[in-house]
Amino acid sequence: MISPRQLSDWWHRLDVRVRDLPLGLLVLAGSFLPALHGKGTEVGELPTRPFDAWALLVLGLESLPLAVRRRWPAVCLTLVSLGFAVDQLRGYHAVAGTALPLALISTGAHLEGRRRAAALVFSAAYVPLAVALYRLGSGGETVTGFVTFYLVLVLAWGAGAWLRGSRIAEAEQRRRVAEDTRSAERTRIARELHDVVTHHVTAMVVQAEAARYLTAAPERLDQTLTAVSDTGRRAIADLRHLLGLLDPGHGAGRGGEVRTPPAGRLLTLVEQTRQAGQPVEFTKEGAPTQPAGSADLVAYRVVQEALTNALKYAHGSRTSVRVRHSEKEITVEVDTAGPDTTGAGTTGSGTAGAGGAGAGTGRFRSVSVSPEGGGRGLAGLRERVTVLGGEFSAEPATDGGFTVRARIPAGNPA
């Protein structure tokens, strides 16, 4: 059995002329109903006469062109107007005369070019018709009546023009919404690329710089270069995941494997930062009691951006990461200590990892911990957290360090 939706889809797949033809046939059929004979539009007070052989041609000329009212509106209005003029001059006064305002509405709505010229031509054509009807009539139709009928026709054209304007405005609105959506998607992609590329490349640069000073310790140099390779592989994996989001069909060709988003890989992120020579203390409290949705990913990005800034601007300074899961939110706090002005540096022992590139890292420290304010980093994180209804702050600490805090409501869909 055919469902209403299938029937509607089939109907809309038909040519527009086929879909408009039933309206013309309906107007034509109504003209032959005995109860409606002589009940159509009457201008000029001419006496009504019975249908004859000419009436069939006139009725067809008035009603059947409605089939092309949207495809060729000017042709439709020309033929319908000609049929209407003969109808009135012959005194048929058929119901098919109602096709004239329908044709005017369609022309006002669908005519693309030379609209003003078309309006002037058909307005001018009405004048000789009104004069002829006035002379042939019984004199009961006044000039006011002819003017009133003309204004009715103008109103029909105006209704079509209003429909056209509404349709154009709606199309423009859809275009703006689509453009805004594309712009927002480009911004989201740019932020993801920033988060992925900046962190991994920063870690690789720091590790490579550290390797220059480990030539006298081949075993540690090998460990540092291995860390660089691992970081590069993670960068490639994250980029493949991001490209998979842009082109889902591309990833499906590899056995249908769907890679888990990086939201649950905080330990890996911390370990990677330690291998780059940054002493990081990581504390995690609680566990999510329900799927956290995009909150997990945003929390991951907050930690990632904070650690990236620590590597870039306070390399070797003590950094602590605290992530606390509660029933309704995720709280993230990343503290980076101020730079060591004594130049003593932090060795590779302790939380920096025994095999990391921590030795001698004091020489790579920046003079300031505060990260750059603009760009897609902290500003982008603030917007992400705010969109989820959370709170975000990034401010200098009293000891010259920097603190990043975020409170992210859990349970938001990705």
Image (cartoon, rainbow, N blue to C red):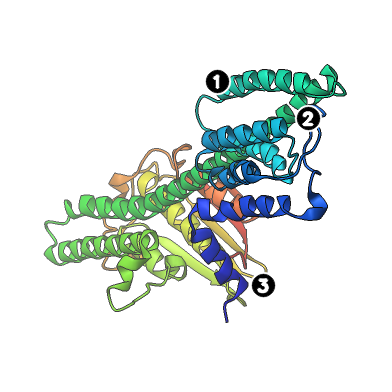
Nearer the observer, 97 or 335: 97
Label 2 or label 3, whichever lies nearer to me, is 2
Label 2 or label 1, whichever lies nearer to me, is 2
**Residue to which mark 2 is pinned:** 43
Question: Is residue 163 visible in this depiction of the protein?
Answer: no
**Residue to which mark 3 is pinned:** 327
Q: Check disc 3 and give the amino acid type.
A: Glu
**Residue to which mark 1 is pinned:** 117
Instruction: Give the class, few, some or many, for how many residues have Cα within 10 Å of label 2's Cα (few <14, many ≥20).
Output: many
Which image quarter is the N terminus in?
Answer: bottom right
Query: Eyeballing the image, is 147 above or below 82?
Result: above
Q: Check disc 2 and give the amino acid type.
A: Val
Q: Which is more N-terminal, label 1 or label 2?
A: 2
Q: Check disc 1 and give the amino acid type.
A: Ala
At horizontal 73% and vertical 39% (from top left) the residue drawn is: 92
Question: Is residue 126 visible in this depiction of the protein?
Answer: yes
Give the alpha-carbon distance from disc 2 to disc 3, as whole Å: 78 Å
Instruction: Give the class, few, some or many, for how many residues have Cα within 10 Å of label 3's Cα (few <14, many ≥20).
Output: some
Q: Which is more N-terminal, label 3 or label 1?
A: 1
At horizontal 15% and vertical 67% (from top left) the residue drawn is: 219
